[in-house]
Amino acid sequence: MSILVTGGAGYIGGHMVHALLDTGESVVVLDDLSTGFRWTVPQEAALIVGDFGDMALVDRVIQQHNIDSIIHFAAKTVVPESVADPLAYYLNNTARVRNLLECTVRHEVTRFVFSSTAAVYGEPDASPVFETALLAPVNPYGRSKLMVEWMIEDVARAHGFSFVILRYFNVAGADPRGRLGQSTANATHLIKVAVQTALGQRSGIEVFGVDYPTRDGSCIRDFIHVTDVVDAHLQALDYLRRGGQSQVFNCGYGRGISVLEVIDTVKRVSGVNFAVEISSRRPGDPATVVAGADKIKAMLGWRPQYDDLAEMVRQALDWERRLRERAVG
């Protein structure tokens, strides 16, 4: 039996593929390579280049590779882009998942792990925010993901498969063994942008709003190491294999770090005092989003191992240097 990882040539999905292979799993990657890279997929994994919403293709993949579990990462994830082009997000993040779910049901795949987002909470009234909080996304990205959560719950209820939905917060860092990191050239992840600025690959970094009701006026987020996120997926899959009932879990550290604090950490770790431009707020950016992660710790036994912002920054810097050497070589 094999595990299908959609988006397995991307940042988080790619780390998932390595982790699964490290534990001896048989892995199939389905990725259209729009933001992922063929070279990131280890030879031990089967790579199929294509659209996860192409039902004929997904039917063949499930049948030919004897898929019994699906971990779905593939998605568009840039909030401002979703505001500017919502239809693209509803097509890719929502409509195509409907097709993937139909294939899941048709071939009786019994386990489904979905990478959702804290964006489904919108602008929460309390911090930290727990799974029971009001779901009120404020941008098309968050809405597109929440629609998928609803679809998964409805389809599972009707057809009897089990799922885990992981709502994770701001993913950062790189593989501690140096095998993978955030590789998309124009990625908008804060630490990626700040690190590239420190290395002279960008002329400066833009901070969108310092007039929020936070300790320094900039947005506060819960930054979680990519390896801890992947470990949560591994434990979710193991939980389902042991017969666990469908669940929704937050995945974060439960502490908030501001945008300006992240930038200061990158400056300190890199030793570079780079330019920072202060701009107005972006539409759809809530002031504070921090995870309440008690449930995942209690039910899955998940324990973060890499909760260190400075170390996340060091790993991101190291990976960016590796990418630069790769491009030169």
Image: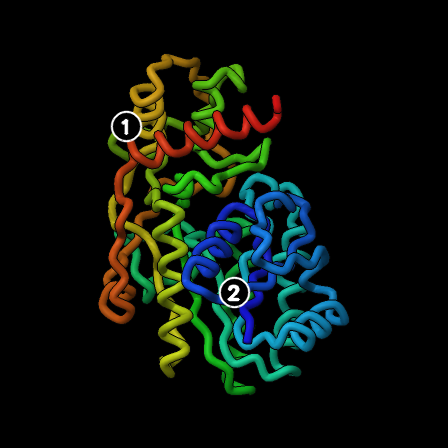
Quadrant of residue 186 within the rendered picture: top right
Q: Quadrant of the C terminus?
A: top right
On screen, residue 28 above or below 80: below
Crowd tier of the residue under label 2, counting other residues whose Cα lies within 10 Å: few below 14, some 14–19, many 20 or above: many
Q: Quadrant of the N terminus?
A: bottom right
Quadrant of residue 23 within the rendered picture: bottom left
Q: Visible in this render: residue 179?
A: yes
Q: What is the secondary structure assignment of the residue under circle 2?
A: strand
On screen, residue 292 above or below 4: above
Q: Nearer the viewer, residue 93 or 137?
A: 93
Residue 302 placement (x, y as % from top left): 27, 61
> Disc 1 marks which amino acid?
Asp
Residue 166 placement (x, y as % from top left): 41, 62
Q: Which residue is mark 2?
A: 71
Q: What is the secondary structure assignment of the residue under circle 1?
A: loop
Q: Visible in this render: residue 213?
A: no
> Disc 2 marks which amino acid?
Ile
Q: Which residue is mark 1?
A: 216
* Dot placed on the residue nearer the N-terminal end, 2 or 1: 2
